[in-house]
Amino acid sequence: MRRGPLEAGEKVQFTDRRSNKITDQLVPGGVTQTSHGIILHDDVIGRTEGSVIVTVSAKREAQINREHPERDANKPWKGTRAIGGWEFAVMRPRLADYVLSMPRGAQIMYPKDIAQVIQLGDIRSGMNVLESGAGSGAMSINLLDAVGEGGSLTTIEMRSEFARVAEANATIYFGKRPAWWNLRTGDFDSVAAGLPEHSFDRIMLDMLDPWNRLEQAYRVMAPGGVLVAYVTTTTQLSRLAEALREAGCWTEPDIQETMERNWKAQGLAIRPDHQMIGHTGFLMISRAMAPGFQALRKRDRATKDTTTDIDSLSAEERAEQLEDLELRDISDRKLRKVLRDLDAQVNVIGG
């Protein structure tokens, strides 16, 4: 964690009184363009976090299209951008702020999901973690931060350009390339085949078909290790859950989904924000059994059928299987009581 005066090369976050945020890298002689003038980086370098920086006027000529000024004739806001005197508080960005603002080549995981991965995956300092799918580096940076220099992270990324994006984002965040990060390019099975058996404490899978990677994941996972998989659709969720059960060497999967809603509080006016971050993805957590031991499973009732597709049945078979498929989970006794109660209430209305 960095402390002390802000230095050139660091990422900083500028926040105005309306909570508008701009994240930028400090460069000697550089500027940050805002809708209320520009922030001179030389005015920021050497300051302490929590300082207030005031924008200065930008030259109007810099806002107007010099080659075709007529294109900006009906755009009065072009001139207002030149007005300075707007205050911004300057801070080092939190990790969540950095992740949301960093350049990305692939869609990133949201902080709400990343936090659950770290917590539910029990990823801690000193652990040896394997990650599949670097993307833009959001999850990788958080894993690197969680395991620390005493641990290690091995990331397997299929596309070399995504690996470059992730590596650059991590290097900028940490101020140097993390020495405890082994970033490999290639498909998961090929790279994992060259890794030592039972050498990883935790595995994080963020890919389209994690169910096809379970064999190699189990080979390199230490007994009792935690597998966390991030998928976005219910079809992926179903296939992965059934693959884990079929393999027999993974514990019953635990499935999580997290919603996020912000609130506004101003005096007695306290209300939720109009917008929220709803579904982004599912997290599935399972643990590796020791070699030679089968995972314990809950026994389903003999009459319970959760695999037959009702569309494949005839009308007669469908009628017979309604209770087995649990389309209406209610006993006959409970149903009779409900009907008696409703009949009594309907009679009151009729009277």
Image: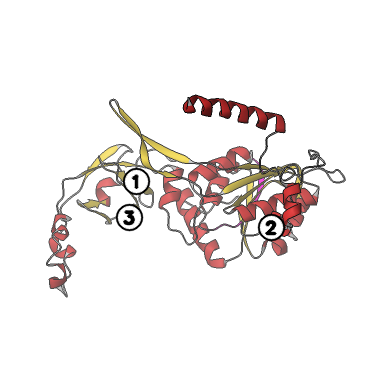
Q: CA separation, marks 1 and 3?
A: 14 Å
Element class at badge 1: strand
Q: Which one is earlier in the sequence, the residue at label 3 or at label 2? A: 3
**Along the horizontal axis of the image, is 280 left or right of 97?**
right
Please identify the residue farthest to the front as the structure is shown: 351
Within-10-Å neighbours for mark 2: few <14, some 14–19, many 20+: few
Which disc is residue 13 wearing?
A: 1
For the rendered model, the colour scheme is: secondary structure
Q: Which residues are magenta?
A: 126-135
**Along the horizontal axis of the image, is 28 left or right of 62?**
right
Residue receiving disc 2: 311
Q: CA separation, marks 3 and 2?
A: 63 Å
Residue at point 46%, 59% (across, down) = 104
Residue 131: in magenta span: yes
Q: As shown in the figure, which amino acid type bears the numbered disc 3?
A: Val
Residue receiving disc 3: 27
Please identify the residue farthest to the bottom as the structure is shown: 67
Q: As shown in the figure, which amino acid type bears the numbered disc 1?
A: Gln
Instruction: Tell me if label 1 and label 2 are in contact, CB under 8 Å.
Output: no
List x then y, in percent, for residue 189: 72, 62
Residue at point 57%, 47% (across, down) = 144
The quadrant where residue 29 appears = bottom left
Q: Which one is earlier in the sequence, the residue at label 1 or at label 2? A: 1
Compare residues 230 and 138 and report the one nearer the observer. Answer: 230
